[in-house]
Image (cartoon, rainbow, N blue to C red):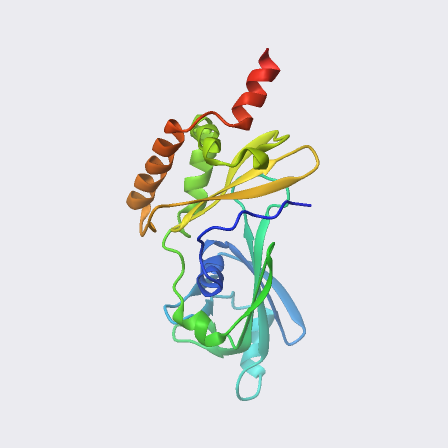
Amino acid sequence: MGDTQDRAAGPGAGERARSVPVAAWSCSVTADGVREEHLGAHSVTGDGEVLLDLPGDSPLRAAASRAPRGGPSAVLEFADVAPVPVRQRIRARLWLAGRFAPADGGPLRLRPTRVVLRQPSGTVLVGPDEFTAARPDPLAGAEARLLTHLAGAHPDAVERLTRLVRPGSLHAATRVVPLAVDRHGLTLRVERTRAHGDVRLPFHTPADDVAQLTERLHALLARAGAACPRALQRQRADGDG
């Protein structure tokens, strides 16, 4: 079981819900008694409609073509998976319910009438209007590349950032890795032998693109460089002695 995550500025439920499909590569679809898994088949329009480009022999496409007016009811499920390997890797799940309708060019279109977001902090029902009005995090599409680069190429920077973490949150830590990043801040996963906890490092102001994110990370590292070594560094130093 994970520890309670530090509370700090982060995306609202609507923004988080809109961001999950942007980062997710796969989508599970259930409609008319049929369940299918699709890779790289979905996209989300600016007003929150989901477009599914399904193969011509898909049973879902056949179900939509023979459905009465309004199209078949459907549930789409997306999993938000951490790009860096960690314990309990799924960070959130999103369910969108609505009815399929044909879209121009051949895809099926679904406008969500029910939106459910489940995160470690709990499950929330996001209103359809809130989902439509929200915008996905501008870093969602680049997050996987950014985090894997940070974890793989700059482990020293990740360790330096632990100087900004409360010493108690690093107690018995065996590994610290970047778990998530959005325009509001960076989340670190603190792993222990049988447990883990997540710690949020907020940016001084939101980042709207990768260039701004780079500046925000440099600002965090500058703060960390001015801070005293914390528990993680002391524990390793003690272990070397």
Residue at the spot 45% in from the left edge and 72% down from the top edge: 130
Q: Quadrant of the C terminus?
A: top right
Q: Which of 14 and 44 is in front in this view?
A: 14
Image x and y of residue 92, in percent: 57, 55
Q: Nearer the viewer, residue 228 or 218?
A: 228
Picture layout, residue 156 above or below residue 194: above
Q: Nearer the viewer, residue 150 or 231?
A: 231
Image x and y of residue 11, in percent: 44, 57
Residue at the spot 39% in from the left edge and 75% down from the top edge: 104
Picture layout, residue 73 above or below residue 204: below
Image x and y of residue 194, in percent: 70, 36
115 sits left or right of 226 in the view: right
Residue at the spot 59% in from the left edge and 56% down from the top edge: 121
Q: Residue furthest bottom?
A: 69
The image quarter in which residue 222 lies: top left
Please count the marks in the image. 0
Q: Which of 79 and 216 is in front in this view?
A: 216
Residue at the spot 54% in from the left edge and 21% down from the top edge: 234
Q: Quadrant of the N terminus?
A: top right
1 sits left or right of 27 in the view: right
The image quarter in which residue 240 lies: top right
Image x and y of residue 42, in percent: 47, 62
Say if residue 107 shows up in the picture: no
Picture layout, residue 37 above or below residue 63: above
Say if residue 144 shows up in the picture: yes
